[in-house]
Image: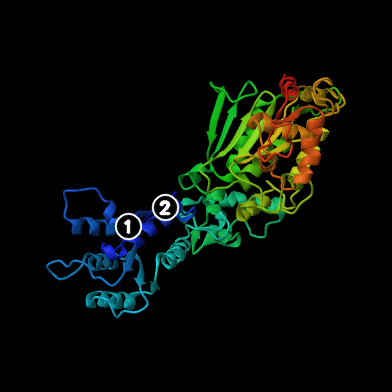
Amino acid sequence: MIRLKVFVSSVQKEMENERRALKAYLRDDALLSRFFDVFLFEDLPAVDRRADAVYLAEVGSSDIYVALLGNEYGSEDKDGISPTHREFCEATRLGKHRLVFVKWATDSDRHPKMQALIVEAGVQLIRRRFLSSAELLPSVYASLVDFLAAKELLRFGPFDAAPCPDATMEDLSSEKIRLFLGIARRARGFPLSEDTLPVHVLEHLNLLKNGLPTNAAVLLFGNKPQRFLISSEVKCAHFHGTDVRKPIPFYQVYKGTAFDLVDQAVDFVLSKINLAVGTREKSNQVPVAYEMPPEVVREAIVNAVAHRDYTSNGSVQVMLFSDRLEVWNPGTLPPTLTLEKLRHPHGSVPGNPLLAESLYLTKYIERMGTGVGDMIERCRNAGLLEPEFYLTDGFVTIIRRRPELALKAVSGQSTPQVTPHVTPQVAPQVTPPVEVLLRLLDSCGALSNTEIRKGLGLKDRKHVGERYLEPALVDGLVELTIPDKPRSSLQKYRLTEKGRAWFAERKR
């Protein structure tokens, strides 16, 4: 995260309250505190340096200079210049971004030299007047937001459409662009020929802004994308058991373009899961089958790479356990989608539309929002449980493993119907919504209704009650923490002994 330094001018007692209020305001604001640190001269410890040298050096090391000008001019040096005036001149000389706020509506009580400084500032830039801290703080907030927007540090559009800081055309691979053209032409009938100049390809795909590569351009065609977008890598791990435990038998961090990341992560999974190879008894073609459909694995991984939040410091994680594949990405669903809607036909709402467009052109993804539905259908047809989707501190996709299915597929045996591996005495007729609820409570402990809805990514309290909580309560898998007061505001839900036994059997 880029940190910017704000120098707040004026050491006169007259403006001390405003300076303190401004620093506290920026420190406590959820947005601006992510970008700005504030320097006040009063906060400096004792140092063996002249005061004027210290504050002028601080102006030089700051990104923004904020002048708060009142009636007093301040103590004058041998040349008759106050510290505030010196600071303003130094910020001007260094070309700093300057913000000037003038207290009081009239100038009748101002020191003549302060009035001259205000006039000098007014010739160079727009000043804002204020009467109190209550008026000053919103004005500073608006000015700092404008600064962030101008520097494109605060985005009002998709992340992938913003210019990639410090990246140039030399950081992109012409060979990768040429390969993309060939694939896109064959896959989707892309109109540009394979000898089109790279810059024209990028312009056609809207991957340039003011002549510079966007984040999407670097992710798709960069020589070393992680040099600019460090967390865009994919971390893959293989565990022999059902939990994350050390030592990890296999761990690999993959780097490269979005295409490279998807291909490498898919290859990692397919190299670790069971693959059955049949004979030519019934055909000249040797039958082969994985324990889970490769198309499902690929869809889960490409969704994580395409739709993740690239502003996060987290990376996509692909974790293979003895009983499941988990794909995690630092992202969430768009406001128009819920976990429930995700399982049904829905419109495509990509978080990174430019990145998604190029992945679509190379047939890595589809546009119609059918990917999750295809995953569910393919898992059913293969005899697997339906994929599970969670919203925790990111978006999680879970695909259950059944290693024996690979051998059955190549031997020509019929695919068995999916049934939970739970005895009737432990958890009869556990529906998918109840199973999702049980897994949430198993991982998080006791949760309130609000916390459950947040964990499930659902908003409808009645829907959660009818499909998730009530069946689990009736089956004795979940219980109230305050059974004597069902409507208590402190009420939470937790697994019963029966619910925990269900998990023990399920893991076994």
Q: Position of residue 424 (x, y in %)?
A: 84, 21
Give the labeled residue for mark 2: 27
Task: Tell me, for residue 164, which label it has, or none.
Answer: none
Q: CA distance from mark 1 to mark 2?
A: 16 Å
| Looking at the image, residue 196 lies above or below residue 300 | below
Between 485 and 353, the one lying in front of the other is 485
**Residue 191 falls left or right of residue 178:** right
Between 264 and 404, the one lying in front of the other is 404
**Residue 109 falls left or right of residue 167:** left
Give SS at disc 1: loop
| Looking at the image, residue 491 lies above or below residue 135 | above
Which comes before the other along the chain, label 1 or label 2?
2
Give the labeled residue for mark 1: 62
* Image-quadrant location for residue 58: bottom left
Mark 1 is on which residue type? Answer: Ser
Assess disc 2: are there few (<14), some (14-19) or many (≥20) residues with their C-alpha within 10 Å of its C-alpha: some
Query: Residue at left 41%, top 66%?
Result: 136
Q: Residue furthest front?
A: 484
Q: Position of residue 229 (x, y in %)?
A: 49, 46
Assess disc 1: are there few (<14), some (14-19) or many (≥20) residues with their C-alpha within 10 Å of its C-alpha: some
Q: Quadrant of the C terminus?
A: top right
Q: Are marks 1 and 2 in contact (CB under 8 Å)?
A: no
Query: Residue at left 42%, top 56%?
Result: 26
* Image-quadrant location for residue 457: top right
Asked whether residue 278 is in view, the answer is no
